[in-house]
Amino acid sequence: MEKPLVRISVRNLVEFILKSGDLDNRRGSADKEAMLKGSRLHRKIQGRMGSHYRAEVSLKYITEYKDVDIQVEGRADGIFTENDQYYIDEIKGVYADVSQFEQPVEVHRAQAMCYARIYAQEQQLEKIGVQMTYGNLDTEELRYFREDHTLEELRQWYQDLLDRYHKWIAYQLAWKKERNASMSNLEFPFEYREGQRKIVSSVYHTISTERQIFIQAPTGVGKTMSTIFPAVRAVGAGMGENIFYLTAKTITRTVAEEAFSILREHGLKFKVITITAKEKLCFCDKVECNPENCLWARGHLDRVNDAVYELWTTQDRYDRETLLEYAKKWQVCPFELCLDLAVWVDAVICDYNYVFDPNVYLKRFFGEGTSGDYIFLIDEAHNLVDRGREMYSAYVDRADVLEAKKLAADYSKGLVKALEKVNRHLLTLEKECGDYEILQNPGAVSLSILQVMGEMDKLLEELRGKELPEQLLEFYFCVRDFLNIDELLDENYVVYTEIGDQGKVVLRLFCVNPAANIGRCLEKGKSTVFFSATLLPMDYYRTLLSTRKDDYGIYVPSPFQQEKRCILTGRDVSSRYTRRGYEEYHRIASYIAKTVWTRKGNYMVFFPSYKFMEDVLDVYENEFSVDWVRCIAQTSGMHEQEKEEFLEEFSTSEGTLVGFCVMGGIFSEGIDLMGEKLIGAIIVGTGLPQIGIQREILRQYYDKKGASGFDYAYRYPGMNKVLQSAGRVIRTQEDTGIILLLDERFAGSDYRNLFPAEWSDRGNCTLNTVEEQLDHFWNSVKESGQLSNQENGSAQD
């Protein structure tokens, strides 16, 4: 059997095996200007060296082991001869004062030694030299370090380096063999529900053809297991290597973890990690990743490889508790431990931003020039539209520029000068700005901000880890974000100015359609599955999440019996702004009272805003309150504990409980209140987003594209909130409940056409008839014997 070939670059090899020292987030990252300057400096140095100097020489070397061949490859910056001896030249551009360097950085020296070993072997040289050339990116002052090596020395050093890497590859190959063997008899762990087999076969086929699919399937079908199972089987069949299960909310991450656990119970061997936000993994009260403020950052790089290897080879499931346990044992940063471990596992469960956000994405997987056989499973995919717009948009506020300029005065004259230039450009825009002003492009602001970034990177490197004011560091990240997004500007963006909260102009780069940016990320993998209970209309989501023309799409009907739920539209009530007032609030409160008085149980009422909710709640409590109905209300900015306490009320409540909530909020999706925990949802209004500058820009943009701007900016996002809120009621086959839609607009064709097909039995009601119609429904359910003993659903929900 032919041995596998593993390829790795010289740089990645030495940075992985030889990394050492502290974590320190106070150091700047190489920006675009620094990269350009570095490339120019490389070319200038190479050009000066004459005809005996060969630049950018490609080198590679294969080392054979019993189980694998490892090919190390890369390009030496330069190879030259002096006094009949060959030298490998490794060039590094830095902002620091090179005259202060006492010795080369170890990983830079190791890169040169790798090239020296390969070239000396290739040319059969007994001796070879290495030269480290450091150049200041501004002054172009140079500093050289030289040393000589025999080929035998380099062979032994290189073999030791590669043996340390082979240890990782050997375990990886053995594990994959064991993993794939565990799938030979792996079957779907449940009896198939209606629609599940269709999802499983469609996902498997999509992965096998390296395509994308959009799946609209209601709650209760079991979407999580129906997408994970075929993805796992596809990995076992060699159609993919890593699964990324992407979510927008913590609860859906938990469901994915449970699905993998169930498959493990049925024999699957699969290593799965859940990436938790840095703030939730940090041991410190305040996240400060530097050796002065964090014990775990001190010497982290010296120990982290040993920590990763032990955790990787002894465990298969890596949740928050496991990561914290091993991080404490090895005294390393748990978040960085998590990211390093993710490279070696079979599945990663994480938030969208670790794949898509240009400032947060996992560079180990998705950096420039990297890709892999990744399978992306995108849960609650409807959330990715607004999240995508947010991730691919950026801004700069003149108020922040002025504050940064004030803070920079104690640190750098160059930075102050660069910030003043930005301020002047923004001031010009401020004088021309009314409510908002759409621009062709950012103009001179982009170039001046690039200069600010260069000055800030220079400052951060010169300080070498010393503290900067937190506000100035935050501004640094804002500048970095702006420049990252500036590079992406195309026809999918609108550039505009508005006057910000502090009375100064804000220049915004607004991504109106994130599909192209999302698509570039997904091209790093092989196949993508978008799925949600609310992907209607599907063409709308296809337009905003994908640029491909060959995407599949399937609609899975609800497995629930229509007889066990009642959907009514109140046609004599409205949430329009022009109708809001005491009379309409009284009508809505009356609807709520008549609904919850019909049958004892727990209900949720969803409103388009907190203000609307509070106004109706005030009328309800003053005019319709009774002793046997208790009301609780969602508040803005609830903490995790407050959210849990709110939901706990629905598990322990006796009598009738009415939860007043906001559409699009934390209780309108991603929560499971099954059986008697929730028997009714009342949705007040069509969920239209509030009118604002960005919504109006979206409307105008899509009108110009020939689409319905109002639908794209308002109606479709609003209906998604409605459908998500309605989906809180019927969660399992055993559930029984009612959905009441309170707005006359729901009766119109514009909205009826957006309802799921299984809502075809929806009826209409008025304030005079709603009680009678609900009574009839509850009596018919009771007579059929389906009302009592409602139980929680099975593990595949």
Image (cartoon, helix red, strand yellow):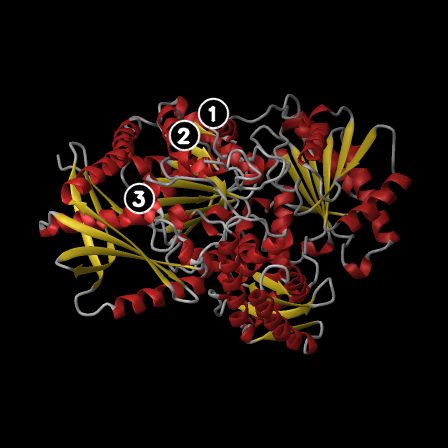
Q: Which residue is mark 3?
A: 14
Local secondary structure at mark 3? helix
Q: Indicate the amino acid at tag 1.
A: Lys
- Quarter of the figure with residue 106: top left
Local secondary structure at mark 2? helix
Q: Is residue 474 left or right of residue 325?
A: right
Q: Nearer the viewer, residue 666 or 494?
A: 494
Residue 506: tell me if it is visible.
yes
Q: Are marks 1 and 2 in contact (CB under 8 Å)?
A: yes
Q: Which residue is mark 2?
A: 307
Real-space Cα distance between discs 1 and 2?
A: 8 Å
Real-space Cα distance between discs 3 and 1?
A: 26 Å
Q: Earlier in the sequence, mark 2 or mark 3?
A: 3
Which mark is drawn over residue 329? 1
Q: Indicate the amino acid at tag 3.
A: Val
Image location (x, y in percent) of residue 605: 73, 41
Image location (x, y in percent) of residue 722: 65, 48
Image location (x, y in percent) of residue 19: 37, 41
For image coordinates 50% across by 48% down, the residue present is: 353
Q: Earlier in the sequence, mark 1 or mark 2?
A: 2
Q: Quadrant of the N terminus?
A: top left
